[in-house]
Image (cartoon, rainbow, N blue to C red):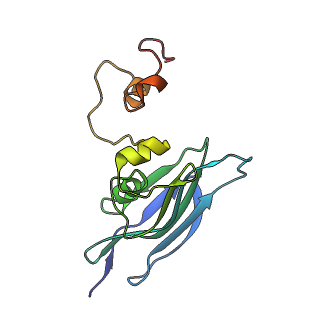
Amino acid sequence: MNERKGPDLTLVGLQGDREDSDENMETNVSAIGESGGAPTVLSLRGVSKRYGPVHANNNVSLDVLAGEIHAVLGENGSGKSTLLGIASGTVVPDDGVVEIAGEPLTTASAKAAMDLGLGMAYQTMTEVIGLSVAENLFLAAPPSERPKYGRMEP
């Protein structure tokens, strides 16, 4: 089988090593700086996903600690949406483990990921006009955890 790799995927706010070849495209990343004891809220270990001959993600490992902000950047086809889909339960990985707040995500289910505490904000124009960004994000939270409408800080 003729294998191909997609464009490079960059994880900003992270440091890591990357080996690129047609046979083996690996990404291993770890958080920069001291954790200060912050818990790991998302952990990906050895996550891989292929679409036919294309490695969307191959052996990706990533830890995100509470309070950190990260960006995933890359060209079209670099595996960004696939990686975030795997983390959020909407894409089934071929290999690897996803843990949210220390609990394994054992099924490809956005609801299961949300029940463990991970939600996803997609870059689509599906926001409710007239609500702030924060208010739109809270729409995915359980009603008991949402601030009362009109009382959010700007």
Vertical relation: 55 (above or below) 88: below
Vertical relation: 142 (above or below) 103: above
Q: Give how far across and how far down residue 113 sits, in percent.
A: 42, 47
Residue 125: name its quadrant: top left
Residue 152 is left or right of residue 15, and the answer is: left
Q: Give how far across and how far down residue 77 sits, in percent.
A: 30, 62
Residue 30: name its quadrant: bottom right
Q: Is residue 99 visible?
A: yes
Q: Which residue extends farthest bottom? A: 1
Q: Give how far across and how far down residue 117 sits, in percent.
A: 49, 41
Q: Nearer the viewer, residue 20 or 97?
A: 97
Q: Give how far across and how far down residue 120 sits, in percent.
A: 39, 43
Residue at 34% across, 62% down: 92
- Counting every numbered tag in the picture gives 0
- Which of the image's four quarters has the N terminus? bottom left
Vertical relation: 79 (above or below) 120: below
Q: Nearer the viewer, residue 108 or 153?
A: 108
Residue 142 is left or right of residue 52, and the answer is: right
Residue at 44% across, 42% down: 115
Q: Which residue extends farthest top? A: 150
Q: Is residue 118 visible?
A: no
Residue at 31% across, 78% down: 4
